[in-house]
Amino acid sequence: MEDTSTLILDIDKIRKDFPVLHQQVNGKPLIYFDNAASTQKPSSVISVIKSYYENDNANIHRGIHTLAERATEAFEASRKTVRDFLGAAYEEEIIFTKGTTESINLVASSYGRNFLDPGDEIMISAMEHHANIVPWQMLCEEKGLKLRVINVTEEGEIDLADFEQQLNPRTKIVSLVHVSNTLGTINPIKHIIDASKKQGAVTLIDGAQAVSHLEIDVQELGCDFYVFSAHKIYGPTGAGVLYGRKELLEKMPPYQGGGEMIDEVSFEKTTYNELPYKFEAGTPNIADVIAMKTAIDYINKLGKKNIAAYEDELLKYATEKVSKLDKVTIIGKAKNKVSVLSFVVAGMHHFDIGLMMDARGLAVRTGHHCTQPLMKHFGLEGTARASFAFYNTKEEIDVFVDSLTKITQLAK
Ligand code: C6P
């Protein structure tokens, strides 16, 4: 069969853009299958960071000198790119944060503390990352709220009947992962957002794993908040985004106090800056926010549709091969998945799988993937997880399957 997506994406050429891929690990060519944890960075992203520090380094929004203006312009250009990337209506709706975790904490703290009352309910699912569990638990404890958890099916899909049954007029926030980092499941978030809105609940979507694979349009989705981290979209660590609907952000109080987020400060009364600066206290991670734009430009150049088609192909290829292996069970068999393949091997601890893979130059993640309640749901301590990006190849999957075959032969 003709391999059409590889014709659209020139994988050999793409691989040349990622310097880190071209190395040996433990005497073997590196095969990087830990993209759900963090993606590698193209040279263009690395160069922008270097160039910023070599040519433009200055604090932003403060100086009128040339370097400050250049840095400010580049920082704000990134905001425009993110707005378009998410299909948001206004630049002011894009708040730069450290990443997904901080974005969720911002909403829990600023919105949750101020607009929820004792007895109100927050709904999450059993497949959430700890970043979308713990901030809500902390809020529930502080404010006397109830945390509801939507069940996940054996296939690893959201149990929609359970969601509908639990949704009620006391549900004030529904916070859900768009794509599960452990199972790869793509959740029917549009359906969940629509139903939640009908009940008057505010919705937050954790897009950490979705943004690199799926086209996102927050206006079409109709969510109130959407969050992600730059390091999962081929950008740097320490930078991320909170998209929030302007109307909500406007009525939310600041998250942190300090420079930049103020309008006027006096000991009698301080007034706050306008959006988005109200939520960006202190000197931000300027270089990495600027480089996030370069990462998005890179993705846009390849085209999300092409990326998704190619990664789907990798997932299908790997799933077919891994399913045939003796002693191996795939965890997460949802109909709609991104290129994440979690599995366990009977009679073998996932850490041993990870170590034996590493000895063969293969980087996979092992453990609970910061989803301990989900692991408990499946009666597991952890899994091994291979997650593919557009720079991975079927040849790499062949090496992975061959290694896994040999590893499983050592299982008790
Ligand atoms: N998941 C993984 O290996 P931060 O750390 O803030 O950039 O992202 C947190 C986070 C939140 N939600 C989801 C769905 C995620 O996948 C992650 C990060 C990594 O699966 C590291 S635990």
Image (cartoon, grey):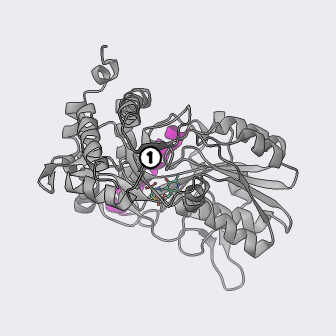
Residue at which label 1 appears? 342
In this picture, residue 135 sits left or right of residue 22: right
Q: Residue at x 76, y 44 (%)?
A: 162
The amino acid sitting under disc 1 is Ser
Residue drawn 40% across the image and 42% down it = 296
Quarter of the picture containing the C terminus is bottom left
Tell me if residue 106 comes above or below residue 315 in the rendering. below
Magenta stretch: includes residue 73: yes
Residue interval drawn in magenta: 65-86
Give the crowd class for mark 1: few <14, some 14-19, many >=20 residues within 10 Å. many
Residue 204 horizontal side relative to residue 119, left or right: left
Determine whether 289 is above or below 143 in the image.
above
Residue 59 lies in the magenta stretch: no
Give whichever of 266, 281 is nearer the camera.
281
On the rendered structure, is 68 left or right of 126?
A: left
Q: Quadrant of residue 255?
A: bottom right
Give percent across and percent down for residue 156.
58, 43
Give the quadrant of residue 158: top right
Lateral position of residue 225 relative to residue 76, left or right: right
> Looking at the magenta stretch, what is its main secondary structure?
helix
